[in-house]
Each structure stands twice: as C-alpha cells, then as structure tokens.
Amino acid sequence: MALHLLKLCVGPASIAELEARIARHRDEALRLGADPNPFHVTRMVPKRAAAIAGQGSIYWVLKGALACRQPILAIEAFTGSDGIDRCRLVLDPAVTAVAPRPCRPFQGWRYLEPGDAPADLDRASAGDLAEMPESLRRELVSLGLI
C-alpha cells in the first residue's frame, strides 16, 4: 500500500506560485542539460521509503492549509559537498490540488497514511470546491468552514 509524506512548502504562497517555481526549475535544468524533474532535498531518508517511492505523493502545506500534492518518483540518498548525508525526493512536475484542510506548522516531514490523505479536488464530492479560486478555499479553511 502506498504511503505519503506531508511537508510544509516554504516560499510559494499558492499553488500557482509552486507551479511557477517548478517551471523555472525545469527551464534551468533543460538549459544546463540536467534532469528536468523537480526535487526536494531533506536531511533524513524516510525509513519507509520503499512504500513511498513510485507509489506515494508529497502533500504540500501552503500558508497553513494542506493544498496540493506531487507524486514522488524516487528517493535517492546522497552525500552533499559538505560531507553531510541527505535525501533527494524526485517529484513528478504535475501538481494536483486536493480538498483543503487546516494544518499547523511543524518541522521536517510527516508520514501520511492513504486513509488520511485528502481527496484530489477533481474527485472531491463537493464539485463547487474545485471551481473556487484557491484564495477563497484558503479563507474558508482558515474560518473552519471546510
């Protein structure tokens, strides 16, 4: 069974800003002849990596709300130029909005069981939710209405 990761997204304040960052990374990687897939570097390798890589997603928390996800293609351990072991989460460039819910700040990442993961917005039971602008969804989450 697939397992997911939950992580705070530092920098982008919206899904559109995250997608723009991914596009900039892709353009730069293609210009340099590098792998264009986006990645995220963490300090620790997930102990349950076998249940995540190629099966799970990273769910991003943007501005206090769990907002979107990206499939995790691979998990690669490596040693940085400073000699410190790190982990590269290789991600699919596709970002999928999910049914938003509030999420308090935390450090690092957390495992997210499939049963606890929010539904993709295109498959959410409330069809109107998928049509709302992201800023309105975020406001409703902050008010505890969704």
Image: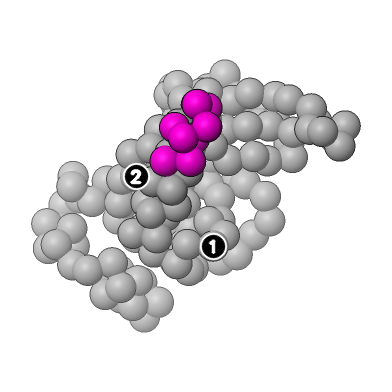
Q: Image quadrant of residue 71? A: top left
Q: Is residue 49 magenta?
A: no
Residue beneath the point at 60% across and 45% down: 110
51 vs 26: above or below? above
Mark 2 and mark 1 lie on one chain; the one further toward the N terminus is 1
Q: Quadrant of the N terminus?
A: top left
Three-letter code, disc 2: Val
Secondary structure, mark 1, is loop
Crowd around label 2: few <14 · some 14–19 · many ≥20 (10 Å): some
41 vs 85: above or below? below
Three-letter code, disc 1: Gly
| Residue 91 position in % (x across, y down) | 47, 34
**Image disc number at residue 95:** 2
Q: Which region shows up in magenta?
A: 27-34
Residue beneath the point at 14% across and 62% down: 131
Residue beneath the point at 44% across and 32% down: 30
| Residue 33 position in % (x across, y down) | 50, 26
68 vs 91: above or below? below
Q: Which color scheme is applied?
A: one colour
Q: Quadrant of the C terminus?
A: bottom left
**Image disc number at residue 115:** none
Residue carrying label 1: 11
